Image (cartoon, rainbow, N blue to C red):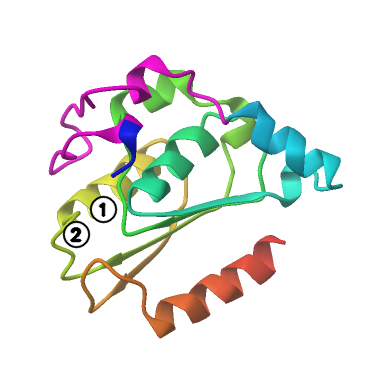
Amino acid sequence: MMPFLNGTPPASASETFTPTLGLVNRPPTLDPVAVTRERERGIEPGRIVLAGFSQGGAIALHTGLRHPERLAGILALSTYLPLAGTLEAERSAASAEVPVFMAHGLHDEMIGIERALSSRDALEALGYAPAWHAYPMAHAVCEEEVTAIAGWLVRML
């Protein structure tokens, strides 16, 4: 578990998730060091995809949707949207049309499918159009999912 996301996510995006430390005390934008490092390597923000699995996916959604520059996309696997209730006020104009790929296991016992669906619905309610994929698996990644990710990345980049 990431130290700044201690706690159990609620069952739906409409419920409040109050982590025990960090996320609510951190600025909602991506660590500028990461973007700066990629820029130094010649990568523009429009070519950067934030990706994460489980809590890493929650971080990718939280920071990517609030990042002040348009990123190439957000890849969120077996995850949920943290602090969904604050996203409308905190999201950046640049992220309004950022592509989002979400995939989840139908049998995920760590983060239930209901939580993932609720997160997808919260994004759609704000005008995002996440590419949604569900697979007959638990809290994992499967070959079919990797194939879908590869196709999505080719289209985004």
Looking at this view, name the residue that lies furthest to the top.
25
x and y percentages locating residue 144 in the rendered image: 42, 83
Q: 29 or 151: which is nearer to us?
A: 29
Disc number for residue 95: none
2 relative to 68 in the view: left or right: left
135 relative to 17 in the view: left or right: right
- The boundaries of the magenta stretch are 4-30
Residue 69 appearing in the image: no
**In the rendered structure, which amino acid carries the disc numbered 1?**
Ala
Disc number for residue 113: 2
Asked if residue 8 lies in the magenta stretch, the reply is yes
Establish if 112 lies above or below 19.
Answer: below
Please tell me how crowded label 2 is: few (under 14), some (14-19), or many (20+) other residues with Cα within 10 Å. Answer: many
| Quadrant, the C terminus | bottom right
4 relative to 73 in the view: left or right: left
Please tell me how crowded label 1 is: few (under 14), some (14-19), or many (20+) other residues with Cα within 10 Å. Answer: many
